[in-house]
Amino acid sequence: MDTPAFSPTWIGIAAAILTTTAFAPQAIQAWRTRSTRDVSLTMFSLMVAGIVLWLVYGILINDLPLILANAVTLLLAGAILVAKIRFR
């Protein structure tokens, strides 16, 4: 049986990598500079809540890529949120 050369899973993996790593530069900068003046507390609070729900959803449907991507994203976005609260 031939396996298809293209799988929608690869699109999901690429999206997970890009959206997860997108938070890394902001998290690094916030902790390095101890400045979060231009970071929206409301936006990151909502984002972290949404990521938690995506993570729970991934766990409920047992989707490993969804679980891993959202667990890492939660760490990065959560670090930014903690920095925003801590470095006021």
Image (cartoon, rainbow, N blue to C red):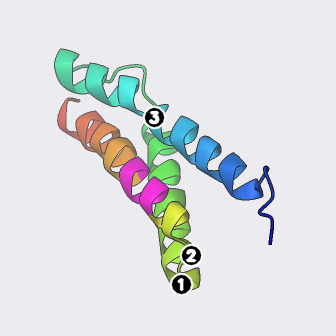
Q: Which mark is residue 57?
A: 2
Task: Say whether residue 72 is magenta.
Answer: yes
Residue 74 position (above or below residue 66): above
Residue denoted by label 3: 21
- Reading the chain from its start, which is encountered first: label 3 or label 2? 3
Residues in magenta, as a range: 68-73
Relative to residue 74, is residue 25 depicted above or below?
Answer: above
Q: Quick check: marks 2 and 1 in contact, CB under 8 Å? A: yes
Looking at the rendered structure, the secondary structure element under dot 2 is helix
**The image quarter in which residue 58 lies:** bottom right
* Residue that sits furthest to the bottom in the current view: 60
Residue type (three-letter) at the residue carrying disc 3: Thr
Looking at numbered disc 2 in the image, what kind of residue is underneath it? Tyr
Tell me, yes or no, whether the two marked residues, 1 and 3, touch with CB atoms within 8 Å: no
Which residue does the numbered mark 1 point to in the structure image? 60
Q: Is 78 covered by the magenta stretch?
A: no
- Name the residue at 62% across, 42% down: 14
Q: CA distance from mark 1 to mark 3?
A: 24 Å
Where residue 13 appears, x then y in whole percent? 60, 49
